[in-house]
Image: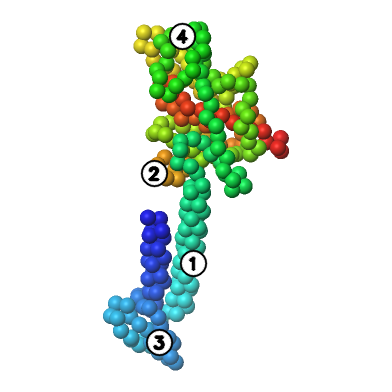
């Protein structure tokens, strides 16, 4: 679709460039395809009448005609350049997409090499202990406070770029993004849960990182990257439904070499 649109724009620009206004000194004009000055007369091809005509040269405002035509040509050239750049960007994006697996998960291209983020196992920690969280399993029946945790104080998936561009293939239409993990002893906290008594409603408290996002395919492949450079620390790409405790986590650590 993008390629067809670009071609249509180029065709429209070409047709527009072929016709222009030949101004008379009284402010009126003829829409022409071309003209030639022949002594004291000007011969032009009228677009309206599809025929060649002549007019005395002293009736025409050739200076205005040439200036406006030059400005139009410059604008058309700039539009052509933009279309070329968009087409180039589209082709580059398609090349990138072809390198990303269709399996749900988080990925990066580092020096054109694919880096796969391992999915972390998370556990709900309440006053009744710790329970492995499974996407299709409901939260244990508890009330009060709990935390959603990832094992180990630090991720083994280390990134040196403070503004990583991450490709994220969703498994379903849910909320997603980058969160900051809070180290606590030998675990990292991803979500602080408040469970309302009786209703068992779950309130999430997560540290979302402001990000830019761009959808690359209809099959829910996105490119995401932080709005600002990330401080060195523990982070994760996540997919979740608020209040459902079904968070899927792909953890990573940022250790920027320049810091």
Whether residue 194 is situated above or below residue 58 in the rendered picture = above
- Residue at 48% x, 47% y: name it: 97
The reply to whether dot 3 and dot 4 touch (C-beta < 8 Å) is: no
Can you identify the residue that label 2 sits on? 218
Q: Secondary structure at mark 1?
A: helix
Which dot, 4 or 2, sits closer to the camera? 2
For the C terminus, the quadrant is: top right
What residue is rendered at 67% in x and 36% in y? Answer: 256
Residue at the bottom extreme of this rendering:
39
Q: Which residue is mark 1?
A: 77
Please tell me whether mark 4 sits on a helix, a strand or a loop. strand
Q: Is residue 226 above or below residue 23?
A: above
Q: Is residue 85 above or below residue 51?
A: above
User: Marks 2 and 3: in contact by CB < 8 Å?
Assistant: no
Q: Nearer the viewer, mark 1 or mark 4?
A: 4
Name, please, the residue furthest toward the left: 49
Of the 4 image quadrants, the one containing the N terminus is bottom left
Residue that mark 3 sits on: 42
Task: Work out whether mark 3 precedes mark 4 in sequence or the reverse, and give the earlier one.
Answer: 3
Please, is residue 102 above or below residue 252 in the view? below
Q: How is the image coloured?
A: rainbow
Q: Residues within 10 Å of mark 2 (few under 14, many from 20)?
A: few
Look at discs 1 and 3 and give the one toward the viewer.
Answer: 1
- Residue 144: mark in rendering: 4
Helix, strand or loop status at disc 3: strand
Measured Cα–Cα span from mark 3 to mark 4: 89 Å
Instruction: Confirm whether residue 183 shows in the render.
Output: no
Q: Mark 1 near mark 3, Cβ–Cβ under 8 Å?
A: no
Q: CA distance from mark 4 to mark 2?
A: 40 Å
Q: Residue at x 51, y 18 (%)?
A: 123
- Distance from the alpha carbon under mark 1 to that under mark 4: 65 Å
């Amino acid at each position: 679709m993008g390629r067809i649109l670009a071609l249509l724009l180029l065709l429209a620009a070409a047709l527009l460039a072929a016709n222009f206004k030949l101004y008379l000194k009284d402010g009126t004009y003829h829409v022409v395809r071309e003209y030639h000055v022949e002594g004291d007369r000007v011969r032009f091809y009228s677009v309206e009448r599809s025929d060649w005509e002549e007019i005395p040269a002293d009736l025409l405002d050739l200076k205005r005609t040439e200036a406006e035509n030059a400005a139009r040509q410059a604008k058309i050239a700039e539009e052509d350049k933009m279309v070329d750049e968009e087409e180039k960007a589209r082709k580059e994006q398609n090349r990138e997409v072809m390198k990303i697996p269709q399996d749900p998960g988080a990925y990066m291209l580092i020096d054109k090499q694919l880096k796969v983020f391992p999915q972390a196992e998370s556990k709900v920690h309440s006053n009744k202990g710790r329970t492995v969280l499974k996407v299709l399993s409901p939260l244990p029946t508890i009330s009060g406070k709990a935390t959603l945790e990832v094992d180990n104080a630090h991720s083994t998936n280390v990134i040196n770029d403070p503004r990583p561009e991450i490709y994220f293939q969703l498994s379903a239409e849910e909320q997603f993004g980058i969160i900051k993990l809070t180290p606590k002893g030998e675990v990292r906290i991803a979500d602080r849960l408040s469970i309302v008594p009786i209703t068992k409603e779950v309130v999430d408290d997560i540290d979302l990182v402001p990000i830019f996002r761009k959808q690359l395919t209809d099959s829910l492949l996105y490119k995401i990257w932080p709005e600002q450079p990330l401080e060195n620390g523990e982070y994760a790409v996540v997919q979740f439904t608020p209040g459902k405790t079904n968070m899927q986590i792909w953890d990573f650590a940022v250790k920027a070499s320049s810091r």
